[in-house]
Amino acid sequence: MSTRQVKLGAMIHGVGHGWGEWRHPQALADASTNLRYYQHQARLAEDARFDFAFIADSLHIHERSSPHYLNRFEPLTLLSALAATTEHIGLVATITVSYTEPYQVARQLASLDHISGGRAGWNVVTSWLSGTADNFSKAEHPPHAVRYKIAREHVDVVKGLWDSWEDDAFTRNKATGEFFDRSKLHALNHRGEFFQVKGPLNIARSRQGQPVIFQAGVSEDGRNFAAQNADAIFCRHESFTESRAYYQDLKQRAASAGRNPDKLFVLPGISPITGRDREEVERRYQEAADLVGIEDAIVALGRPFNDYNFSGHDLDAPFPDLGDLGANSHKGTSERIKQLARDEHLTLREVALRFAKPERDFVGLPEEVADAVQAWFEGHAADGFIINSLLPDGLEYFTRYVVPILQQRGLLRTEYPGLTLRDNLGLEVPANRNARPRQDEAVA
Amino acid sequence: MSTRQVKLGAMIHGVGHGWGEWRHPQALADASTNLRYYQHQARLAEDARFDFAFIADSLHIHERSSPHYLNRFEPLTLLSALAATTEHIGLVATITVSYTEPYQVARQLASLDHISGGRAGWNVVTSWLSGTADNFSKAEHPPHAVRYKIAREHVDVVKGLWDSWEDDAFTRNKATGEFFDRSKLHALNHRGEFFQVKGPLNIARSRQGQPVIFQAGVSEDGRNFAAQNADAIFCRHESFTESRAYYQDLKQRAASAGRNPDKLFVLPGISPITGRDREEVERRYQEAADLVGIEDAIVALGRPFNDYNFSGHDLDAPFPDLGDLGANSHKGTSERIKQLARDEHLTLREVALRFAKPERDFVGLPEEVADAVQAWFEGHAADGFIINSLLPDGLEYFTRYVVPILQQRGLLRTEYPGLTLRDNLGLEVPANRNARPRQDEAVA
């Protein structure tokens, strides 16, 4: 069976990425440092046969940061704990390339990969908050283009380190005393523009060979990076049309880079809202919308502009001219917002609310949400979705009411096909760059 | 009850710190990346009411590295996984200050501390292998004295970041919308010689306030650092007399630094070997000794000398003159070895075997091992021990046969006194440096 099926990830994010989600009556106000909350969400996703759980991250906070940013688990430690209480679901950690050492990133991800039996993934980010530099003894935050140069080299080094040991390097022969075969240990000897890393790494490859690479590319640099390096892309789109254009663009870039576009999954983040009847759907939509006040929306709008403080601007005047602001932060997203405001002549208030309110595409009765999923999937606007719930029981509703319909339609699996994240996604174990083909293969 | 009791830690180390332990017939040859092995050892230690599990570490390997070094879990990810399947035992991670960012160390340890409900500890090391620099884009390995200067500043920054949030900062008032009290959030604004870190940290303090600090100080710099900064010291001594001298020295240094010496625990690492009768004890001792061949002993001897390769030297000639070698590696240990060889006119072979063979002090019938533990403890040569087993079932034997005797003698607890590592050790929750005394306290 090689029928294309919908890929699903669960974004688990404590008290939520917005400012108001923690105020919902059913919300656990300490969810962002509550292990039981994360274990429960991961179990819901695993019971529904999701491909992976996804943990976002950032490394700089200030007084206007959203509640979840202020006080939360670190992704690698959190996912290692979740590895011990789950069996199948992939575990995707967001880690920046701008403030980390490739050796440490390679090692911690490989360790998570072993701990989880081959279920680790890396969401590669470049960090968009310039204040991060102040926490890492750096004089300045690298410019956007430089961050993507760093990203290319960083990911290259990490992947190279992951191949330090060939899969059959550890002979562990108690009789002869040979623990490993020296010819299957490889130093990297990388000397690049940003990193000098000799290696080898002090951990073997896992059952899935290498962790799966995720990325969120919106800008030109980001799209090219994703097309060349990522196995899956996390994105966000306002409409089917917009998503389909992005999807086609990324698939074309992947093909141009010499890759099989079917092995680069485009996964928009969506916030589905459903209910058992029309009334519950509307009540839940209103609850989610009510969690976003205009004050919060204005603060949230600042995020792609390096946490710009909009509070000095008139809410009902046209969206202000921000010059270059945002170009060295979330470049793609900030440009998209400026464009939208210009094209539709929107006020600051309108832009903020448009940006903050839950989209309507995935709101409806379970059948309707399933229809939307199917339409985006079959219309090649998405290979699947990252479910980013706004309500405390949003993932529970989606898995209980929408997932069974998608399974009945054959769009979702009912059993896991294997043991690793690559198994979940249908990705092959990558060959080790240092392994010579075996004699029989070489002859064939 | 404030009777002084023996502190116990379990060093868990996969296929062992030596070269031959993996060859034991009962050894799991893949133990260093086998989560079930670590879970089993941690459970043995927790069932015996140990204070903590201890994970050693290093960041550089080469062809002559010992099997465990070549391919093992990374400590923070491993301990986070163990946190999910244990309840009481402390979780101590070895992390270097020479190749890490304080913000990241503070954050990952704090995250482990939350995940485990307040059971994290940090074994602060400065890295002794100069080759580590080659994995971290550094031109050179910092000299020994500089590493300790870095250590002081790094630990200061980490502790400062841990106090970013006062314990009652998160008000989480759903009615008013106040998630936190701004007056209880504190930036660090550190600008030092090695690090510039603004803060604040993006995670709160845990139930135990701050992770517990461990250190292994042998050299003059190391001892002073430990006396000033550590809650517990991991050390290694050949005899009661040597250990008592070290113990007294450290306690005096702690007192000189203005600290209560009773709150700095000196914990020698020991490798006890016991059995159900005299014959089993001797058989097990011989098994452990047989795991150390002279080739392995020679490689192991190189370790404190920056992995120096002794293989070119005559085994039966006097211990060679190594000049300054080792002074920028394991300085204290390498000096101790040179001194020993000089004082006792030993050959290279004799030094290597003396250094590698299991010591005899903690070998014997269960009562005898318990006697030795009691003698060192009551004779003020130790506040407790880190059990570093050589045989695959060494921890099992110790916990099954020796621990009950120590419990009967009132030297070990039979139940955990609380929930955190600080509770286990009888250490108070440290006050937050940024918290102003409450009015009633200020008046009193």
Image (cartoon, coloured by chain):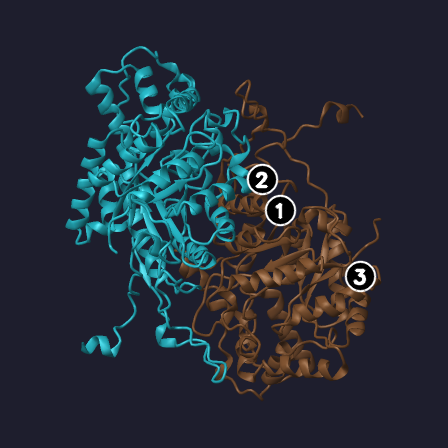
Chain colours: A cyan, B brown
Distance from label 2 to label 1 (Cα)?
9 Å
Q: Could you classify mark 1 by the number of other residues whose Cα lies within 10 Å: few (under 14), some (14-19), or many (20 or more)?
A: many
Q: Quadrant of the C terminus of chain B?
A: top right
Q: Is residue A327 above or below residue B396?
A: above
Q: Position of residue A48 (x, y in %)?
A: 41, 45
Q: Secondary structure at mark 3?
A: helix
Distance from label 3 to label 1 (Cα)?
27 Å
Q: Quadrant of residue A133?
A: top left
Question: Is residue A7 left or right of B408 when viewed as pictured?
Answer: left
Q: Residue at x 25, y 28 (%)?
A: A336
Q: Could you classify mark 3 by the number of other residues whose Cα lies within 10 Å: few (under 14), some (14-19), or many (20 or more)?
A: some
Distance from label 3 to label 2 (Cα)?
36 Å
Amino acid type at mark 2: Trp
Query: Do residues under tags 2 and 1 come within 8 Å of each other at their CB atoms?
Result: yes
Label 3 is found on which chain of the structure?
Answer: B
Marking on residue B162: 2
Amino acid type at mark 1: Pro
